[in-house]
Amino acid sequence: MEYKPTIGLEIHVQLATKTKIFCGCSTEFGAEPNTNVCPVCLGLPGALPVLNEKVVEYGTKLGLALNMHINKTSTFYRKNYFYPDLPKGYQITQYSIPIASEGFLEVKTSKSKKKIRILRGHIEEDSGKSIHTGDITESEYSYIDFNRSGVPLMEIVTYPDIETAEEAYEFLVLLRKTVRYLGVSSGDMEKGALRCDVNISVSKGETLGTKVEIKNLNSFRSVRRALEFEINRQIETLKKGGKIVQETRHLDERTGETKPMRTKEELNDYRYFPEPDLPPLILTDEYIEKIKETIPELPNEKEERFVKEYGISEDYAHEITASIEVAEYFEEAAKLTGKPKEVSNYLMVNIMKFINENGKNIKEITFGAKEFKELLDLIDSKTISKNIAKSVLEESLSSGKTPSQIVEEKGLKQITDTGEIEKVIDEVIKENPKPVSQYLNGKKQVMGFLIGQIMKKTKGKANPKIASKILIEKLNALK
Ligand SMILES: [Zn+2]
């Protein structure tokens, strides 16, 4: 029997509100330390929290998009622990009844589709940020920035339904897409707007193995690496007859290994108790209905619709819907041109390449649906060949000129005048006696070479169909 990994995720999503969850301080990222603070988020005595309505709206929206049940009454609790970046000595969070519970996301991997169930989603405040100088274990000095204290989070906890590093990775990718489609979070892992802890054990058979937690994974790649390493480490340990220690580990980004870590939560009993300064959060059916109506078409739905409605490949549909802006760009161009397949090809091959190489956003390029139509019409009317179209597209992307402008200015119109093409072909036949005689002796492969010569002389402008037809006629006449 093989060892089977069991993985669960705990993800903190920063909700993209302008102000904090219990006070009016700004949530702006990267501000001067300790400038976005007030008595509430500094935990000064006597300061009282007031719940930010936008946090409730975003939390409800995200819960619904993750197919969760929204609890009409939910409550806030104090989670007690001592740590310098937690000024009140407790974190206000939700406990027994969170705002959302029991949902799922359907994740696609290279092998299959799989429903990963979500246990709960609760809203809570973030802590401040400790900045340590020196090594992670032997800090010399610690600094605390309270700008992050009180920033709203939604914690999403999955069931341990995940069995591979790839599934965990795809779950996170889909979650990020979803929060971006909804506009409830930037989903930027590098700015801490999406943070992930994982629980993992391996086992043979029914009894679950000892669970290890890996904390503070701050990129999609880290999650994947940490899990791949940890699955392997646990299996190898057990195979050698060793035991897995229940502990918290962290990923060493330099080596890709996970290592045991001292944490602030060790030996902690959080002594949860109801937050006396906040009443229960009560939502009406009308409120939940109203939020439901604001949920746009979600990534998986859009992806499936693109395949069905536009007949593009599943891979392209997956990539195009990765960003809502790219998806909207595609759909507009597909509709206007009536040629979705061509649009998806040029978009994924040429346009995305240009965007990635130049660090641009799809919204910043001047080549839109109208220009797409112009380009495809030029090919349709045989004014330019598909080959030339590619260079016209590239030129249009970098210069901002329209396709017809470029074709006009550079004289790229395809030569369809048979007289002109005949002249060139006569030259090519004259200049290449050897390939011509090879052709006449039955070596048909030299056709490609001769066509190449014609294209070279016309700078790619000869209509290839007409050119090859005339060439064959002329060669056969030599027999
Ligand atoms: Zn504040």
Image (tube, rainbow, N blue to C red):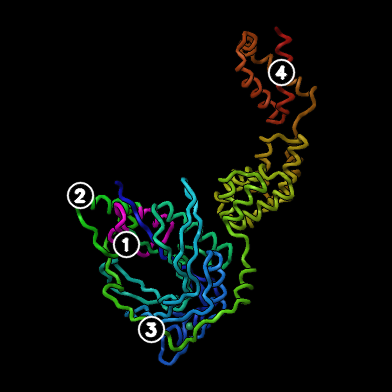
The reply to whether the C-beta atoms of the residues labelled 2 and 1 are less than 8 Å apart is no
Q: In front here: 196 or 201?
A: 201
Q: Position of residue 268 (x, y in %)?
A: 29, 76
Does the CB distance between marks 2 and 3 fall below 8 Å?
A: no
Q: Where does label 3 land, which residue?
A: 273
Q: Which mark is residue 471?
A: 4
Find disc 1 in the rendering and name its residue: 250
- Compute the Cα span from label 4 to label 3: 88 Å
Q: Amino acid at mark 3?
A: Phe
- Answer left or right for 268 relative to 43: left
Q: Earlier in the sequence, mark 4 or mark 3?
A: 3
Query: Looking at numbered disc 1 in the image, what kind of residue is underneath it?
Result: His
Residue 283 in the image: above or below residue 359 = below
What residue is disc 2 on? Answer: 240
Amino acid type, residue under disc 2 in the picture? Lys
Residue 255 makes an appearance in the image: no
Disc 3 from disc 1: Cα separation? 30 Å
Q: Is mark 1 within 8 Å of ligand 1?
A: no
Asked whether the beta carbons under mark 4 and mark 3 sit within 8 Å of each other, the answer is no
